[in-house]
Image (spheres, rainbow, N blue to C red):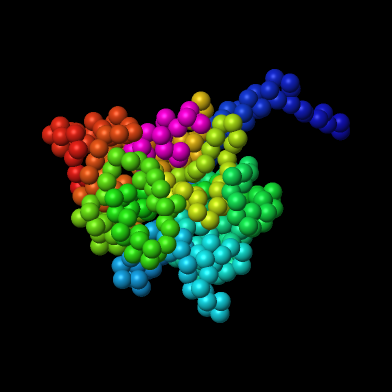
């Protein structure tokens, strides 16, 4: 007995294809959102670990947390290297050293994570380790170049690794907690015992307006009345320029380098500022920093991690600076100016709480 083979008609096939396309259209946004949420959770876990490592470091160093001032400033003078004696700080950082040696005077990450994360002893490779293996899961853009102005003796090692692929910077410590006020030179002089430190302090507080309380020190017990309200570090990427793309600066004495940044309160911040001229046309500097659906993850000094919207980061200066910091209006976003005036009954120079 003959059997007739039954096949789809063209109309039936088109209907099936349409249904599949519809289902894909419905599911893809949900899958994309789930993926973004998962990446944000991974980022928060990484930040939690890094914040915890810094608290461990502080507990072993008289409550002084790892910061460019505590870690990097001595390298602007002479340091003692076991087996070599007294050498310049720059020579002590170059080439092959230890996994916990800072890669630049701004590097606060290597000293607290180098051992536990098994960072390379080579400076260039250690920088790559920080970017590639200890970064935000959403930070998936690669640096286009090494900053052309960098003049380190091992610059060729960085250039070779950059060709293989070095991901964007992930986490930045705000200047309020990374640096010192420009009127506190005595503190830096005490750290380097008279050596030249101008480079590490020159325009450190590029926000210029906020002045930390007199005698502020980079200790866990000095950041503020509530450690849970103060930001140790946050998502952020520098340095993007529309004309050149993304690069990083391996100069030993880089002004901000790949580890610190002015806060979102500074309207011309390279990482967070809407008025940063080199990226004003595209806003790509903001896309790279506010990478969690126009928000950033922030790690607090009590090691808690949460999400802060872009709008929120522009409004309230208090989380970005120590308690007692004197606030002024210069170069600040209008939202933050208005907020601080409201908090201080209209006073032009209120104090951060």
- The residue lying furthest to the bottom in this view is 83
Residue 313 appearing in the image: no
Q: Which residue is at 55% across, 35% downward?
A: 241
Residue 302: give x, y in percent of width and height. Answer: 30, 59
Q: In this view, does 290 lie to the left or right of 312?
A: right
For the image, the number of numbered tags is 0
Towards the viewer: 352 or 203? 203
Residue 312 on image: x %, y %: 32, 37
Residue drawn at x 35%, y 41% is 207
206 within the magenta span: no
Magenta stretch prevailing secondary structure: loop
Residue 276 lies within the magenta run = yes
User: In which quadrant of the rendered image does the N terminus lie?
Assistant: top right
Query: What is the x, y in percent for residue 27?
Result: 54, 35
Q: Residue at x 46, y 55 (%)?
A: 106
Query: Does any portion of residue 8 appear in the rendered image?
Result: yes
Query: Of all residues shown, which one is farthest toward the right?
Result: 1
Part of the protein shown in magenta: 263-280
Q: Quadrant of residue 6?
A: top right
Q: Nearer the viewer, residue 114 or 287?
A: 114
Looking at the picture, tell me which residue is in the foreground, 201 or 263.
Answer: 201
Image: 76 above or below 150: below
Residue 195 vs residue 328: left or right?
right
Tell me where residue 228 sits by quadrant: bottom left
The picture places residue 325, in percent across and down from the top left corner, at 24, 47
Residue at the far top in the pictured view: 11
In-front residue for pair 81/169: 81
Q: Which residue is drawn at 35% across and 59% down?
A: 188
Left/right placement of residue 172 relative to residue 161 reads: left
């Amino acid at each position: 007995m003959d059997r007739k083979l039954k096949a789809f008609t063209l109309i039936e096939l088109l209907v099936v294809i349409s249904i599949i396309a519809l289902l894909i259209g419905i599911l893809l946004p949900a899958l994309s959102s789930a993926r973004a949420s998962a990446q944000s959770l991974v980022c928060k876990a990484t930040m939690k670990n890094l914040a915890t490592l810094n608290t461990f470091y502080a507990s072993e160093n008289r409550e002084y947390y790892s910061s460019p001032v505590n870690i990097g400033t001595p390298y602007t003078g002479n340091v003692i290297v076991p087996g070599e004696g007294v050498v310049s700080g720059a020579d002590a950082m170059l080439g092959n050293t230890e996994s916990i040696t800072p890669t630049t005077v701004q590097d606060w990450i290597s000293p607290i994570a180098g051992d536990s994360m098994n960072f390379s002893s080579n400076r260039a490779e250690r920088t790559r380790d920080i970017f590639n293996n200890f970064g935000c899961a959403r930070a998936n853009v690669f640096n286009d170049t090494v900053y052309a102005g960098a003049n380190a003796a091992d610059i060729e090692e960085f250039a070779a690794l950059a060709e293989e692929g070095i991901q964007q910077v992930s986490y930045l410590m705000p200047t309020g907690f990374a640096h010192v006020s420009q009127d506190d030179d005595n503190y830096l002089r005490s750290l380097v015992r008279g050596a030249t430190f101008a480079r590490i302090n020159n325009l450190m507080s590029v926000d210029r307006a906020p002045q930390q309380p007199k005698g502020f020190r980079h200790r866990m017990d000095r950041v503020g009345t509530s450690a849970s309200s103060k930001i140790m570090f946050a998502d952020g990427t520098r340095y993007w320029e529309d004309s050149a793309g993304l690069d990083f600066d391996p100069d030993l004495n880089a002004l901000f380098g790949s580890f610190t940044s002015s806060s979102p309160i500074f309207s011309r911040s390279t990482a967070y500022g809407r008025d940063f001229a080199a990226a004003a046309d595209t806003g790509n500097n903001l896309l790279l920093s506010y990478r969690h659906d126009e928000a950033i993850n922030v790690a607090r000094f009590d090691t808690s991690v949460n999400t802060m919207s872009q709008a929120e980061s522009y409004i309230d200066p208090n989380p970005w600076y120590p308690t007692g910091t004197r606030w002024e209006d210069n170069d600040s976003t209008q939202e933050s100016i208005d907020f601080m005036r409201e908090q201080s009954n209209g006073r032009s120079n209120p104090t951060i709480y």
